[in-house]
Image: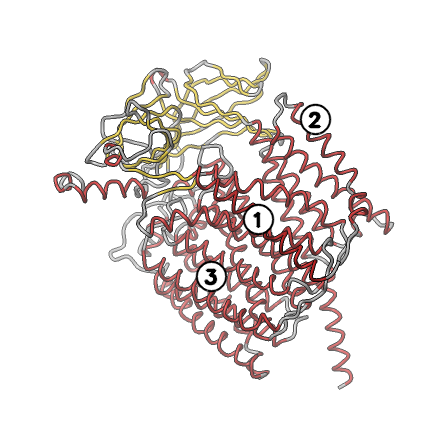
Amino acid sequence: MKTRHKRIALIAGGLAVLGVATALVLSAFQSNLLFFFTPTQVAAGEAPQERAFRVGGMVQTGSVRRVGDGLTVNFLITDTAKTIPVSYTGILPDLFSEGKGVVAQGKLGPDGLFRAQEVLAKHDENYMPREAQHALDQASKTSDATRSQYP
Amino acid sequence: MIPEIGHFALILTLFVALAQGGITLAGAARGNATWIGFARPAARAQFSLVAISFVLLMWSFIVKDFSVSYVAVNSNSQLPWFYRMAAVWGGHEGSLLLWLLMQTGWAYAVSLFSRQLPDVMVARVLGVLGLVTAGFLLFVLLTSNPFERLVPAPMEGMDLNPLLQDVGLIFHPPLLYMGYVGFSVVFAFAIAALLAGQLDSAWARWSRPWATAAWLFLTLGIALGSWWAYYELGWGGWWFWDPVENSSFVPWLVGTALIHSLAVTEKRASFKNWTVLLAISTFALSLLGAFLVRSGVLTSVHAFATDPRRGVFLLMLFAVVVGSSLLLFAIRAPKVGLGGRFELFSRESLLLVNNVLLAVAAGAVLLGTLYPLFIDALGMGKISVGPPYFNLVFVPLMVPALLLIAVGPVANWKRAKLRDVLKQLNLPLFVAVVAGVGVPFLYGRWSALVALGIALAAWIATAVVMGIFKRMRATRSGLLAQPRSWMGMHIAHLGMAVFVVGVTLVMGYETEQDIRMAPGQTVTAAGYELTFRGVRSELGANYAAQVGDIVLSRDGRQLRLMHPEKRNYFFSEMPMTEVAIDANGLRHLYVALGEPLADGAWSVRVHYKPFIDWIWIGCILMALGGLLAISDRRYRLKRREKRTAVIAQEAKA
């Protein structure tokens, strides 16, 4: 085989690999992007119904309730302006507690209940999850009334 | 006074590093032997100075000097002494000091183990390393001084993050940094070669042991991090595709491509430009990883208190390093010859495909890691990319790479015959098919993915064993008489097979139960019974624990007691899960306490993880292979030849 043919074959092979990879990446990317919404956005109906997404804020004080066998937990996530009811079955992370930041990942049911498949809290008690902080900031920006409650 | 001396030593190092960078590079450019001779003593001085300041910081931790802000934030009088010592790198400032210690340590090692190199080359390499060190020193001195005082000094420290109070802290960061920083040596070799305009096989041979050394440390560091996360975070996962993990994994992927590409450059003088580009990229990606982890753009256990100045500085450092080295590359690359020619089917072309696959995989992981940050920075909303994306993209890319592991070593350089290669792969193919079909049946549940994974692992392992036997028979020599770099390659490939077995079986057959357990209640997992006896209180050095008693038994026969814990650390008031694991090399039973429920019952997490140990054993084998490769006689032989040549010359004179 001539050198030129060889080079063409190599380049074609490389391009084919790249093409397949790009196709893989893009299709996987599309179906696995998780969008984040604040409770205010969810209340306004901006969040999708069938697709999984993330919602974050603070666990409303006094809202955590265990139901049934004790493994299912219901609680409210608030950004101080709006709240969204969340249900989760399983073991919560160590740093999950009332009045602390939280991010839940799951799907919104037609009844308005957010069924979480995963609940994330920070690794360290001093910091808020970024997304939860973002939700609180958004809410305090839009409503001056709540600013006094939220330090 | 002691912290001030440490600080002063760092400032002094900066001047030495700058002087080394300037004087030796100028000396190399002008051929001034005196200036070139400055390289080695300067490397030694930098290492000594940084070591002094490192030991002094450690001393401040040991004597509990809470007037040093970093000590006060990251330790506590009740923290055990070994954690106080490891706490030196438990936070941002100290871990950068560790980084510097490694950086100057690598440079010192280069000055020691480079007798076989021309002095002017050593001067260039050490000069580049000096400049890199200076960049990091500026970063430390300007934004992250570990010796900063706290006035007035507090009586008590804030304690180390409980997640970090573990043996993992003692080993994981040093190993990982050794890897990250080690790639700066390969980078320096590449830049030195570009400066000299001498990209040849000799350059590749000099770089190879350093690249392999950095790679083996990075492999161990990542594996240890995975193991640590597995038992410490209490979720039972060994890899989360977390951005922080990814930022160490991307340099690993590119570094793996680099050590393969270096092999081609050394043996066949091909791929020279590509190898240089990989050497630059690997170090650049290490820097990018440091930026992502240290700047606070990512949230994770690794991100400490955020200071925007730090992120900006690191980004600038990254831009300067990448920009200047790519510029140099652009100027010099066209002059580099093409090197040895090769046919379409040859070991070179197979290694080229391996490189493309690894580079594409690294790119895909990088995309998934950086895209959410871009979107966030552009104010286009908050998104995240979950593990399903990475699995979907990564697995299909790695399948052909794993297939090629068995093919590459049996293909000839320059020109391979397809028929000969296929003939050597008959047996591996047979074993792969049998194992792929058989093993899932043994587990009782057939799955195509498990079959594929096991078949690939068997394919690689059989080819490795066959390769070793063939060579032993052909050379009529024992296992230990084989060239070490060649054995190293096979051991590392075998490690990959072991790793694939672990990943495949864990992902295919693990079980996970989150359940409520009342005292006396029994749960079964993979044929084992676990009986919950209840929870009692215990007091640790700096925490109070609730310790669960769980009896593990099989067919009514009691095997052992397991004690998962829930700890509350006094000073940070942070709850922590300590899991209990029963391991036998073939499976883990993993028990973690959740929360107390009514009537003495607890929520309990019970996992069954078949062959999970093999994931880390595979990584250890890969690192062992690397170690064998760098201990190869031929790297030392060169030195002896050179020395005898020098002696002969002196005798003549």
The answer to whether tags 2 and 1 share a subunit is: yes
Position of B513 compared to B498: left or right? left
Secondary structure of the residue carrying tag 3 is helix
Tell me what residue is drawn at x 13 percent, y 42 percent: A144
Outermost residue, bottom side: B653
Q: Is residue B477 above or below residue B529?
A: below
Protein chain holding label 2: B
Q: Distance between the residues labelled 1 and 3?
A: 20 Å
Residue B58's image quarter? bottom left
Asked if residue B333 can be seen in this view, the reply is yes
Q: Name the residue under label 1.
A: B219
Residue B259's image quarter? bottom right
Q: Is residue A98 above or below residue B29?
A: above
Secondary structure of the residue carrying tag 2 is helix
Q: Position of residue B85 (x, y in %)?
A: 44, 50
Protein chain holding label 1: B
> N-terminal of the two: label 2 or label 3?
3
Q: Are marks 2 and 3 in contact (CB under 8 Å)?
A: no
Q: Mark 3 points at which residue?
A: B100
Question: Of tags 1 and 3, which is closer to the observer?
Answer: 1
Q: Mark 2 points at which residue?
A: B438
Query: Which amino acid type is shown beneath numbered disc 3?
Result: Leu
Circle 1 Cα neighbour tier, 10 Å, few/some/many (<14 / 14–19 / ≥20) = many
Protein chain holding label 3: B
Query: Which amino acid type is shown beneath numbered disc 2?
Result: Gly
Secondary structure of the residue carrying tag 1 is helix
Residue A106's image quarter? top left
Q: How far apart are marks 2 and 1 (CA)?
A: 31 Å
Position of B498 compared to A140: left or right? right
